[in-house]
Image: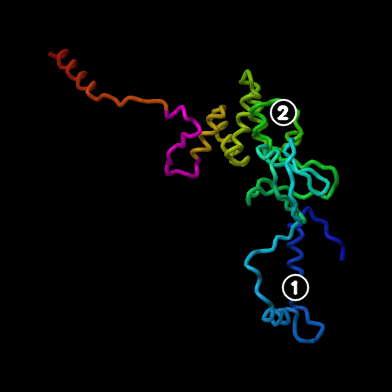
């Protein structure tokens, strides 16, 4: 049988499961029925599985370096920059690497079996753009960042309309602090369709999604200055004064 060519373990698991299912109907070599029937008999003698699932991985402790990376198995993997110089736990599975802090997963990457590689997630470095916007063009984490096409279309629009287009584009990218790339792309596409080209318009659409027609209250935590605006209640007595003026004019 030829060796299958696949892109990932997940892609290989499907055919393997089908082969295993078909093999259960094969006659057992001992002549005691099929493999499935023998397996069912064997299951009756097995101990129950442990309550906690065994984690099939290699675990090690590490200190995140100043570039917000940890070393595992000859390669460097990124974590969010707020964890720089912190102690973390690395869990190396056969197909992925998870970095854990305080029992929570802070980063996850496909595992590389090459050597001296840097596996960087751009979103781990997004906050750097607030202080160093030039990193977007020259920083390694953002060098091969593949975003949906709508982001580049928006960038071109900004260059035609704005004096400082990169500043506004970075404001858009910083929305990743609260939303996924797909969510931002959908809201951005709608904003452009409406003829709104500001990041504030995109954020409003993200806060008030089309799939929430009930009209949930706009969350103003992102704009604390909104709560500081005080609007006086209208004085309806003014309408009565207008009527009095009209009566005087008619009289």
Q: In the shown orientation, is residue 87 left or right of residue 248?
A: right
In the picture shown, does residue 99 fall above or below 18? above
Residue found at x 76% / y 28%: 138
Percent coordinates x, y for residue 176 in the rendering: 61, 37
User: Where in the figure is residue 66, as x and y percent of width and height?
Assistant: 74, 35
User: Which x, y percent locates residue 107?
Assistant: 68, 46
- Rate crowding at label 2 as few (under 14), some (14 to 19) or many (20 or more) other CA atoms within 10 Å: some
Where residue 236 sits in the image (x, y, percent)?
Answer: 24, 25
Which residue lies at the image location 46% right of the left edge and 37% below the top edge?
A: 219
In this view of the protein, which residue sits in the foreground, 23 or 126? Answer: 126
Q: Is residue 187 left or right of residue 150?
A: left
Dot 1: element: helix
Dot label at residue 52: none
Relative to the observer, which residue lies in front, 70 or 179?
A: 70
Q: Which quadrant: the C terminus?
A: top left
Magenta-colored span: 209-227
Image mark for residue 135: 2
Q: Find the distance from the CA under tag 1 to the CA under tag 2.
A: 54 Å
- Taking the magenta stretch, the answer to whether it contains residue 216 is yes
- Between 6 and 153, the residue placed more toward the observer is 6
- Point out the tag, 1 or 2, that comes first from the N-terminus: 1
Determine the secondary structure under disc 2.
helix
């Amino acid at each position: 049988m030829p060796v299958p060519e696949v892109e990932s373990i997940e892609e290989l698991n499907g055919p393997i499961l089908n082969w295993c299912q078909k093999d259960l109907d094969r006659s057992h070599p001992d002549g005691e029925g099929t493999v499935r029937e023998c397996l069912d008999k064997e299951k009756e003698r097995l101990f129950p599985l442990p309550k906690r699932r065994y984690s099939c991985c290699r675990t090690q402790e590490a200190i995140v370096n100043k570039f917000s990376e940890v070393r595992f198995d000859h390669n460097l993997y990124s974590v969010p920059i707020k964890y720089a110089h912190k102690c973390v736990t690395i869990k190396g599975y056969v197909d992925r690497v998870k970095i854990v802090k305080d029992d929570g997963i802070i980063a996850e990457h496909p595992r590389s079996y090459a050597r001296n590689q840097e596996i960087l997630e751009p979103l781990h470095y997004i906050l750097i753009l607030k202080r160093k916007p030039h990193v977007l063009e020259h920083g390694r984490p953002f060098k091969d960042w593949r975003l949906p096409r709508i982001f580049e279309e928006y960038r071109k629009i900004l260059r035609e309309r704005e004096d400082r287009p990169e500043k506004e584009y970075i404001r858009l990218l910083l929305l990743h602090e609260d939303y996924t790339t797909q969510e931002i792309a959908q809201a951005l596409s709608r904003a452009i369709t409406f003829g709104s080209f500001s990041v504030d318009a995109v954020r409003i659409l993200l806060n008030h999604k089309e799939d929430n027609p009930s009209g949930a209250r706009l969350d103003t935590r992102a704009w604390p200055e909104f709560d500081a605006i005080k609007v006086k209640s209208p004085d309806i007595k003014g309408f009565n004064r207008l009527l009095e003026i009209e009566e005087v004019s008619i009289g």
